[in-house]
Amino acid sequence: MTCGTRRVSLWLNSGVPATEAARRAGHGVAVLLKIYAHCIDGQADAANQRITDALGTKDTEPEPGGEEAATARRRLERRRSKARKARIGA
């Protein structure tokens, strides 16, 4: 992963709108979403919560597989973190 890829991934995962991330990266939105779609996959639960909060209602139907997907993402992140630490000798 290049520095630019990390930077754009960080922006998207931090909630920066795709239009702004594309502008900063020098891409069109369509190109950005095609290249970085994997960075924003799995954010349905967070998006649903923001919508629910904005509407002031209780979300009665969570995203299918939401908890399982979140668990899988956490597990993957732990593995990546361990691999990074192993590479730098920490």
Image (tube, grey):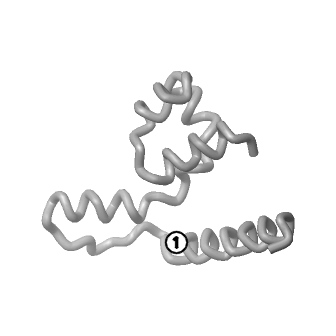
Q: Is residue 30 above or below residue 6?
A: above
Residue 29 shown left or right of residue 77 in the figure: left
Q: Is residue 69 above or below residue 23?
A: below
Q: Work out which residue is located at the far left of the displayed protein and give it.
A: 56
Q: Quadrant of the image for the C terminus?
A: bottom right
Q: How many marks?
A: 1
Counting from the top left corner in percent of width and height, residue 80 is at 74, 67
Q: Quadrant of the image for the N terminus?
A: top right
Counting from the top left corner in percent of width and height, residue 29 is at 49, 27
Q: Residue at x 61, y 73 (%)?
A: 74
Residue 31 shown left or right of residue 79 in the figure: left
Task: Kindly indicate the quadrant of the structure image that contains residue 70.
Answer: bottom right
**Structural crowding at the residue carrying mark 1, measured as other residues with C-alpha within 10 Å and reported as few (<14), some (14–19) or many (≥20):** few
> Residue 52 or 76: which is nearer the viewer?
76
Q: Residue at x 50, y 53 (%)?
A: 13
Q: Is residue 33 above or below residue 81?
A: above
Q: Residue at x 41, y 44 (%)?
A: 16
> Residue 39 or 62: which is nearer the viewer?
39
Q: Is residue 3 above or below residue 46?
A: above
Counting from the top left corner in percent of width and height, residue 23 is at 46, 25
Q: Residue at x 61, y 41 (%)?
A: 36
Counting from the top left corner in percent of width and height, residue 30 is at 53, 27
Q: Amino acid at mark 1?
A: Gly
Residue 22 shown left or right of residue 76 in the figure: left
Q: Which residue is mark 1?
A: 65
Question: Which structural element holds mark 1?
Answer: loop
